Amino acid sequence: MKIALGSDHAGFLYKEKIKELLPSLGHEAVDFGTHSTEPVDYPKFIRPAAEAVGRGECDRGIVLGGSGNGEAMAANKVRGVRCALCWNEETARLSRQHNDANVLSLGERMISEEMALLIVRVWLSTEFEGGRHIARIAEIEP
């Protein structure tokens, strides 16, 4: 899969670790920035990553920040994006199985690096169960 990555300065270090991990799992990383720990406004990097997923240019996306909350909110404003903020294996698994999340949000200040990488592995390897769950959010008209 082609995975869009986007972070602000507070998620930069984990983004770099995830970018290193993805090829070993057979995925291609597309990095939308930021490219350092210098303070930036997160929407400038999160929105382009989410839009790449929404347009179908990338199969999924991973966005990162200090808490991951703002990043999830920004990503979810993009049509076709179903972004889930995850903090453990179970939330990652359920976001895929039940919600067909196509973007993952992580908070670098909230979880360990080890947990972040485990969440990414679980999230990327879990399939959507389909059918028996509530209609996907992207299919519900406002």
Image (cartoon, rainbow, N blue to C red):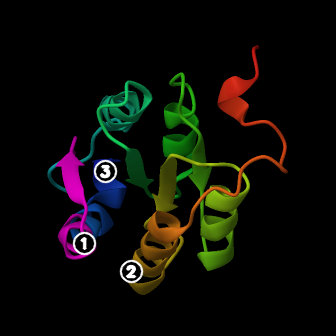
Quarter of image, res 112: bottom left
Observer-nearest of 127 and 99? 127
Q: Residues within 10 Å of mark 3 (few under 14, many from 20)?
A: many
Q: Residues within 10 Å of mark 2 (few under 14, many from 20)?
A: some
**Which part of the image, by quadrant, shows the N terminus?**
bottom left
Find out whether the residues at labels 1 and 3 contact each other: C-beta distance under 8 Å.
no
The answer to whether residue 109 is seen in the rendering is no
In the image, 111: left or right of 28?
Answer: right
Find out whether the residues at labels 1 and 2 contact each other: C-beta distance under 8 Å.
yes
Residues rendered magenta in the picture: 19-34
Tally of numbered discs: 3
**Residue 133: image x %, image y %?**
83, 49
Q: Looking at the image, is mark 3 or mark 2 nearer the viewer?
A: 3
Q: Secondary structure at mark 3?
A: strand
The amino acid at mark 1 is: Lys
Residue 17's tag is: 1
Task: Look at mark 2 in the image and give the residue it sits on.
Answer: 113
Observer-nearest of 113 and 39? 113
The amino acid at mark 2 is: Glu
Q: Is residue 8 magenta?
A: no
Quarter of image, res 20: bottom left
Placement of 97 over or under 2, stated as above or below: below
Placement of 94 over or under 28, stated as above or below: below
Task: Look at mark 3 in the image and give the residue it sits on.
Answer: 3
